[in-house]
Image (cartoon, rainbow, N blue to C red):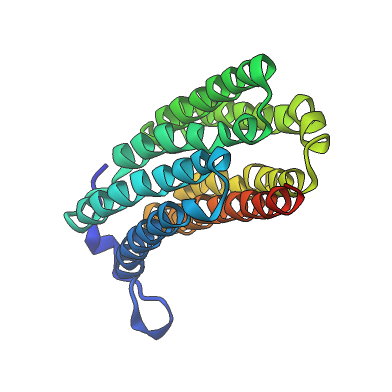
Amino acid sequence: MNLDHTLLANTAAGGLSVNELTQYLFWIGFIAMASGTAFFWLSKNDVLPKYRSTLIVSGLITGIAAYHYFTMANVYKSGEFPTEYRYIDWIITTPLMLIKFPMLLGLGAKGKKWLTQLVVLDLIMIVTAYIAEVSEIASGTWWTFFLVAVVAWAAIIGLLFTGIGGAIEGAAPPIAKGLRQMRLFIAVGWIIYPVGFLLALAGEDGGSIREIAYNVADVINKVGFGLVAYYAVKTMSAVEQKEA
């Protein structure tokens, strides 16, 4: 989608234009994701070997996002909305976020079944959201595929609170606490994405305001999600080492 910079001349408080704020947030997103990757990978030796894969995946999520944020910053600067790059990022990173639930629970065959369900629902959510995003704003296609994406997201939340919810409550206290917090990122933190999508209806600056919402949410959800997982496995490692 083309970005008409002449439509973004309105300034925010302090004289910063919406366009400039959006551009800065792309670069802040890149720095935050890259820093998260360094932290997760450098911290993997803080936990027992069996928990290191959790931190490797956390760093992979933020590392992939850092690359895409670097690319998106340059695409936006050139006068385009980086919609395709954003959805390429999400179709890779959001399944990686969800697989951490069965990964931390170590549920064997049942975990694989839940993993498959989570990933399929996530792919439906991302693909239909992308179709909606590139459709004419407020058209029938735009609304239809947006609503399908929201239903898929609701199904993910339902699975995390029902089937997987029982397994979470039966896990060791540090892991259960971490997974409950991680579940809130999916149930509450991901709300900003449908809200951000609807910001496209906000007039001539709607597209850039949408990008601001997405950028802020991505940093909180990806880096914050990884930090919660880090503290869960670090605490669990300390408990197991003490008991050994």
Question: Which residue: 40% across, 33% down?
Answer: 92
* Extreme residue in the left direction: 78
Total marks in image? 0
Near-viewer residue (92 or 151): 92
x and y percentages locating residue 228 in the rendered image: 62, 53
Q: Is residue 176 visible?
A: yes
* Extreme residue in the bottom direction: 14
Near-viewer residue (182 or 156): 182
- Give above or below for 35 relative to 54: below
Q: Is residue 85 left or right of residue 146?
A: left
- Give above or below for 178 relative to 117: below
Question: Which residue: 41% across, 49% down?
Answer: 62
Query: Which quadrant of the figure contains the N terminus?
Result: top left
x and y percentages locating residue 217 in the rendered image: 51, 54
Q: Is residue 80 left or right of residue 41?
A: left
Near-viewer residue (205 or 172): 172
Q: Is residue 73 left or right of residue 25?
A: left
x and y percentages locating residue 80 in the rendered image: 23, 49
x and y percentages locating residue 158 in the rendered image: 73, 29
Near-viewer residue (37 or 155): 37
Q: Is residue 165 left or right of residue 12?
A: right
Q: Is residue 203 visible?
A: no
Question: Which residue: 33% across, 52% down?
Answer: 66
Question: Which residue: 63% across, 36% down?
Answer: 104
- Give above or below for 55 relative to 95: below
